[in-house]
Amino acid sequence: MGLIKKFRIKSYKKEENIVQLKNISVFYNKRQILDNLNLKIYKQEILGMLGPNGVGKSTIFNLITGLKDPNHGEVIIGGVNCTKFPINERFTKFKLALVPQYGGLIQDLSLIDNLKLVGEIHINEKELRHQKINKLISQFEFESLLKIKAKHLSGGQKKKLVIAMALINDPKILLLDEPFAALDILTIKMLQETILNLQSTEEISIVICDHQARDLLNCVDRAIILSNGRIIAAGSPNEVISDKVAKHEYFGDEFNIN
């Protein structure tokens, strides 16, 4: 599959920083996961995170959402140090949304009922809730699937539904955990196009963590490679796959994205 990203954001102004992890160190049972890590996520960019298992990718998501507190360092969202903020306050005040690798929907409810359930949680005003759900139905082309129970949807349809549910609250930051896992080639391409459309139409920052390196690099503006608790390479997809350290630690010599 060739590159599908039609444009890449070349540079970012300092004031467009929307999330910052500052001097972050994290330990699990005395094992160090992140080692004085510094990371900035910029407004309306698609950032990809790659690295071996256990390197800290999911930990970064947990730090942003508040599921994990750092042992050292600060989590800054929208210019506010929210290191001690609880999970619910981060999601509501800073408009976070997380699409987990597994789950995220109720299998015995229909597609429309899953959307309505989340809508009732986030939107009190009935007419506004109705408008938002109808917009998502049109945006994701769900019209023919509304009455189908989630457990009978395909893998790609389930993933699109969970993303749509995450968008109910109009997030500014969308975290996607392993969105391409266990999907076929055509479904992955559809999902990549969905992600690109979200960037342009919803103007949100999207962070993708996945082991499918080629699929991830085909739809991000910038990528980071993690190894031994640190960022060993960062830049455009072509820059990171050309990085000597990243080749040695993660990609190997033969990897390409074309």
Image (cartoon, rainbow, N blue to C red):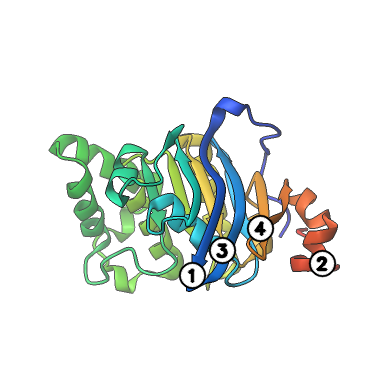
Q: Amino acid at mark 2?
A: His
According to the image, label 3 marks what residue? 56
- Give whichever of discs 2 and 4 has the lower sequence position: 4
Q: At numbered mark 4, what does the secondary structure look like: helix, strand or loop?
A: strand
According to the image, label 1 marks what residue? 28
Query: CA–CA distance between discs 2 and 1?
Result: 26 Å
Please state if 208 lies on the left or on the right of 99 as rendered.
right
Rendering quarter of residue 252: bottom right
Query: CA–CA distance between discs 4 and 1?
Result: 16 Å
- Give whichever of discs 2 and 3 has the lower sequence position: 3
Q: Which is more toward the observer, 121 or 224? A: 224
Q: Quadrant of the N terminus?
A: bottom right
Query: CA–CA distance between discs 2 and 3?
Result: 19 Å
Q: Amino acid at mark 1?
A: Tyr
Q: Amino acid at mark 3?
A: Gly
Residue pictured at 31% horizontal, 51% vertical: 87
Q: Which is more toward the observer, 215 or 139? A: 215
Query: CA–CA distance between discs 4 and 3?
Result: 9 Å
Q: At numbered mark 1, what does the secondary structure look like: helix, strand or loop?
A: strand
- Give whichever of discs 4 and 1 has the lower sequence position: 1
Q: Residues within 10 Å of mark 3 (few under 14, many from 20)?
A: many
Q: Position of residue 235 (x, y in %)?
A: 72, 46
Query: CA–CA distance between discs 2 and 4?
Result: 15 Å
Please state if 109 lies on the left or on the right of 15 as rendered.
left
Query: CA–CA distance between discs 1 and 3?
Result: 11 Å
In the drawing, what numbered circle is on residue 230?
4
Residue pictured at 76% horizontal, 53% vertical: 240
